[in-house]
Image (cartoon, rainbow, N blue to C red):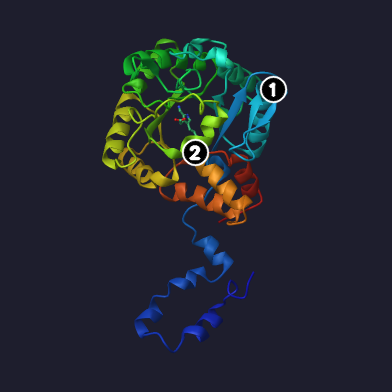
Amino acid sequence: MTSLGKNTAAGLRTAASSDVDEITGHRRMRRNRISDWSRRLTRETILSVNDLIWPIFIIPGANIVEPIEAMPGVSRLSVDKAVEAARMAADLGIPALATFPNVEMEHRDQTGSYALEPDNLINQATRAIKAAVPNIGIITDVALDPFTDHGHDGVLRDGEIVNDETVRTIAAAAVHQADAGADIIAPSDMMDGRIGAIRRALDASGHQSVGIMSYATKFASALYGPYREAIGTSGLLKGDKRTYYLDPSNATEAVRDAGLDVEEGADMLMVKPGLCYLDICQALKETYGLPTFAYQVSGEYSMIKAGAAAGYVDGERVMMEKLLAFKRVGCDGVLTYFAPEAARLLAKGYSV
Ligand code: PBG
């Protein structure tokens, strides 16, 4: 500890005695900050391993760990390696995984039909992880972008991402995901009416206990870049996703949109990306009171990694400070590629 950090009550008095007025003397905010024990005692927000959801990327094959260039420290994993990762995560106490596939080009088409294959890559991963590590939650993303040859989240017809046909496809895909053992279905496509359609499809197929975490407010953000490299859509995507994702300017619309998901039966809400949209996190939690999560997306992750690698910032401290920020505004947890790293630090008693 530095001599400043060790500042004692006595030291504070000498330093500040003569040049402050009487009133200030009664309102010294610094008293509670003087020592480590009093800072711990007065700490309002605590980040714990129970707040972490770990997104992982799956590729076909066996025994493959393929680093993702734009996401230092993150790799695409074959199903057997994903099982190992799941075991490690469970041992660290991480409650849940979110899985994303990178499938071969031959499985990608205009309508994302591979999403409807009961034994597609994402469902193979769920089956394998559930069999080997039954005590970790599995959250599956149900958008079509990993399966379309144009990288959009929906069915493309005459230059348009068509809503209702997309919703029918993802509701059917959600049932396959639940059949494979997914605990929570997380639609990330922002089509209208998808939460209700998925809920009805799950209930009709006996999956009343499978939950829905809605990517309720997903913004048309520049921060998804590295993820698109991770699932192999960056070279495919033509145009952008502004006709279905939210405009980053619109907070009121975001709250209204999330409200529809709540009415349609969402069990949990998510805000994506995270840090630029802390106002939305706070608003959703206060307005609806549902379990609310932030997705610290790939761009947020990679910028911290790049800053740390360049030596501009202390990567560990920045990581933990940003994760804590989500908790402070009222989120119940965070989807973060840092989950294992953060979990290890927390296990050592780290606090910001
Ligand atoms: C799309 C989807 C995206 C992410 C997960 N699912 C965004 C996109 O490519 O438009 C982004 C995750 C990240 O950036 O970490 N269904």
* Percent of width and height locating residue 38: 53, 66
- Quadrant location of residue 283? top left
Residue nearest the observer in this picture, 282 or 218: 218
Total labels: the figure holds: 2
Please, what is the three-letter code of the amino acid marked with disc 2? Val
Height in image: 287 above or below 41? above
Q: Can the viewer see residue 295 in this picture?
A: no
User: What is the quadrant of the N terminus in the image?
Assistant: bottom right
Please, what is the three-letter code of the amino acid marked with disc 1? Asp
Residue in the picture at 34% in, 40% down: 248
The residue tagged 2 is 297
Residue in the picture at 56% in, 69% down: 35
User: What is the quadrant of the C terminus in the image?
Assistant: bottom right
Residue nearest the observer in this picture, 226 or 334: 226
* Percent of width and height locating residue 322: 50, 50
* Percent of width and height locating residue 104: 59, 17
The residue tagged 1 is 80
Q: Earlier in the sequence, mark 1 or mark 2?
A: 1
Q: Secondary structure at mark 1?
A: helix
Residue in the picture at 41% in, 46% down: 276
**In this rendering, the label closer to the viewer, 1 or 2:** 2
- Does the beta carbon at disc 2 come under 8 Å from ligand 1? yes
- Does the beta carbon at disc 1 come under 8 Å from ligand 1? no
- The extreme right residue here reads 63
